[in-house]
Amino acid sequence: MSIEETPRYVRLRVEVVLEVNDVDAVTQAALRRITDDEGVPDGERVHAQSAVTEDTAEALAHLVDPFDLVSEVPGVELAQASWSSEEIEYDPDAPDWELDEDDETAEYPEDPEGAEGAEETEEAVQGVR
């Protein structure tokens, strides 16, 4: 494939399951990030602080930033990103959590445990900060 035929945009899908051992530490870190972000209007800041205090998944959504994952990758610029977080039931021994034969093309279940009613947080980034 020549350079002219190379796709300019690439969609990178990543799914991460985190075990939260210290909810208070996560919440406090998210609150610090919100407080330190000078670009957040006061009204949004109050709403965000309330949300991260009530929901650990929301706190994690404020701490994990796709821009941080790719900001130092040479030759790329983040064009758009979206991510979500939700509390789930996780059983590493369940068949739903096993990787497919070919890890490179593995597709993971959207909602392996049927976490109905789970609050989901959507964040989006357009362009580079």
Image (spheres, rainbow, N blue to C red):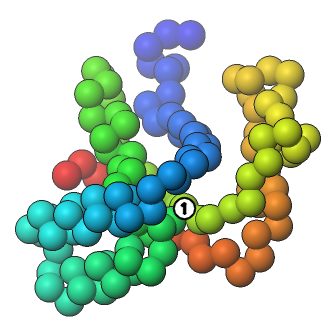
Q: Residue at x 38, y 74 (%)?
A: 52
Give neighbour class at mark 1: few <14, some 14-19, many 20+ (Cα, 10 Å).
Answer: many
Q: Residue furthest top?
A: 2
Local secondary structure at mark 1: strand
- Say if 119 sits above or below 19 in the image: below
Q: On the picture, is 71 further left or further right than 89?
A: left
Q: Residue at x 81, y 56 (%)?
A: 112
- Say if 43 sits above or below 4 in the image: below
Residue 129 or 28: which is nearer the viewer?
A: 28
Residue 46 or 123: which is nearer the viewer?
A: 46
Q: On the picture, is 57 further left or further right than 42?
A: right
Q: Residue at x 14, y 85 (%)?
A: 42
x, y percent for residue 7:
50, 28
x, y percent for residue 45:
22, 80
Q: On the picture, is 53 further left or further right than 104?
A: left
- Residue 77 in view in this figure: no
Q: Residue at x 84, y 29 (%)?
A: 100
- Say if 32 sits above or below 99 in the image: below
x, y percent for residue 78:
34, 42
Tag count in the figure?
1
Quarter of the rendering containing residue 93: top right
Q: Residue furthest right?
A: 95
Q: Residue furthest bottom?
A: 43
Which residue corresponds to mark 1?
85
x, y percent for residue 86:
59, 65
- Residue 121 in view in this figure: yes
| Amino acid type of the residue tagged 1 in the rendering | Ser
Location of the N terminus by quadrant is: top right
Residue 20 or 30: which is nearer the viewer?
A: 20
